């Protein structure tokens, strides 16, 4: 076992702060400036491009304003407003990427993945393998995850575990503006298909971000808080739930190390297991549903590779195995929170 080099917590010497949403926009803009083969496809990303005479140029910038301003700079041949057909524009992006372009497609919500699953499962993920490496598919799928906004069951899921199960697809889960920009640039430059999961609850978060382009390594985690008694593994927004829980645990004399996963395929098992061998306990906090989840996979790997170092069973804090409820009270109960993490850790520490 070798200790993996983690992604830095924050850039050194940088004072500029921007929002998570704007970091995504900046990454797209800079990569499109750098490489003319980068194109962008999706629903409403250019606010009715092609109907400029009606005054609708960039009226949206996408449902979450991450593509705002790109149509004016790059034109409607590189920023393409598409029909409401995920199968069509995701398939077109994958085809373009296999023939020399670097296409970025925006799937408005991850819940819609069923509409374009064949294109992802049987084309993007398998083409390079089935053609013996003669074809590259440098395709990036942007999509949104996360509950807690009253958007009901069809606009609130996480589902990154589904993509992680498919060989040939990579998947990243940025947790702040710094990782949002660096991981998106890395995804666009990668020669394999990458799914980029944006959490809706992070769009307004501020953070330090360099102005110049930079790429963070895919498949690497980082430690955002040091600790000695338990390892907490967070995914996307759940990383900050873990840090909140760690602060509460510290008041009770329990020292929690927090790992920000950043990638769900590949997963940085080395980083996690190295931590668990020192803390002897692990809790994985995952907003996705529990069966066949990332949390379950990490717990299984820890049990296989670090069993002799464990003082308690690997544990999970996840959403329940249900669709996301529309009721705000039920939705608040659905999403993992710091109190549930604290309770799980206390159960492990107090275990006899």
Image (spheres, grey):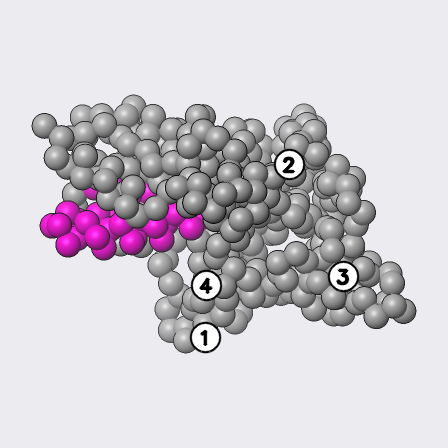
Among numbered discs 2 and 4, the one appearing first in the sequence? 2
Q: Which region is colored magenta? A: 230-258
- The quarter of the picture where residue 306 lies is top left
Q: Can you identify the residue that label 2 sits on?
A: 113
Q: Can you identify the residue that label 1 sits on?
A: 16
Seen in the picture, residue 159 relative to 209 is either above or below; the reply is: above
Q: Can you identify the residue that label 3 sits on?
A: 47
Question: Which mark's residue is nearer the viewer, 1 or 4?
Answer: 4
Among numbered discs 1 and 3, the one appearing first in the sequence? 1
10 Å crowding of disc 3: few (<14), some (14-19), many (20+): many
Q: Describe residue 216's horizontal placement relative to residue 10 as left or right.
A: right
Q: Residue at x 73, y 51 (%)?
A: 43
- The quarter of the picture where residue 76 lies is bottom right
Q: Residue at x 65, y 29 (%)?
A: 121
Does the stretch in magenta take in 29? no
How far apart, in angstroms, are the residues tagged by discs 1 and 4?
14 Å
Q: Secondary structure at mark 3?
A: loop
Find out whether the residues at labels 1 and 4 contact each other: C-beta distance under 8 Å.
no
Q: Residue furthest top?
A: 304
Give coordinates of residue 243: x percent, y percent: 30, 53
Among numbered discs 1 and 4, the one appearing first in the sequence? 1
Q: Secondary structure at mark 4?
A: loop
Among numbered discs 3 and 2, the one appearing first in the sequence? 3
Q: Note whether residue 25 is visible.
A: yes
């Amino acid at each position: 076992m070798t200790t993996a080099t983690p992604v830095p917590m924050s850039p050194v010497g940088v004072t500029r702060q921007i929002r998570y949403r704007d970091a995504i926009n900046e990454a797209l803009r800079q990569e499109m400036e750098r490489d003319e083969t980068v194109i962008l496809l999706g629903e409403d990303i250019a606010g009715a491009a092609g109907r400029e005479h009606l005054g609708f140029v960039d009226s949206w910038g996408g449902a979450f304003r991450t593509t705002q301003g790109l149509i004016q700079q790059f034109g409607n041949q590189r920023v393409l407003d598409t029909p409401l057909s995920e199968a069509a524009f995701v398939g077109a992006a994958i085809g373009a990427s296999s023939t020399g372009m670097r296409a970025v497609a925006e799937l408005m919500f991850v819940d819609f993945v069923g509409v374009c699953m064949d294109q992802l499962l049987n084309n993007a993920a398998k083409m390079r393998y089935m053609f013996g490496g003669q074809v590259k598919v440098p395709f990036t799928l942007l999509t949104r995850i996360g509950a807690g906004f009253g958007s009901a069951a069809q606009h609130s899921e996480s589902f990154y575990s589904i993509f992680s199960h498919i060989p040939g697809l990579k998947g990243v889960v940025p947790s702040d503006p710094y990782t949002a920009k660096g991981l998106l640039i890395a995804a666009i430059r990668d020669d394999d298909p990458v799914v980029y999961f944006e959490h809706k609850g992070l769009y307004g978060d501020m953070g330090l971000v360099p102005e110049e382009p930079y790429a963070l390594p895919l498949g690497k985690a980082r430690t955002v808080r040091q600790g000695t008694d338990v390892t907490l593994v967070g995914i996307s927004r759940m990383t900050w739930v873990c840090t909140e829980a760690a602060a509460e645990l510290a008041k009770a004399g329990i020292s929690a190390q927090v790992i920000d996963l950043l990638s769900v395929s590949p997963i940085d098992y080395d980083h996690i297991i190295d931590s668990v061998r020192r803390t002897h306990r692990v809790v994985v906090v995952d907003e996705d549903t529990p069966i066949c989840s990332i949390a379950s996979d990490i717990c299984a790997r820890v049990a296989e590779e670090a069993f002799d170092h464990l003082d308690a069973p690997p544990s999970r804090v996840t959403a329940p195995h249900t669709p996301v409820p529309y009721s705000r009270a039920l939705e608040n109960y659905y999403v993992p929170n710091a109190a549930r993490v604290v309770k799980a850790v206390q159960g492990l520490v107090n275990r006899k």
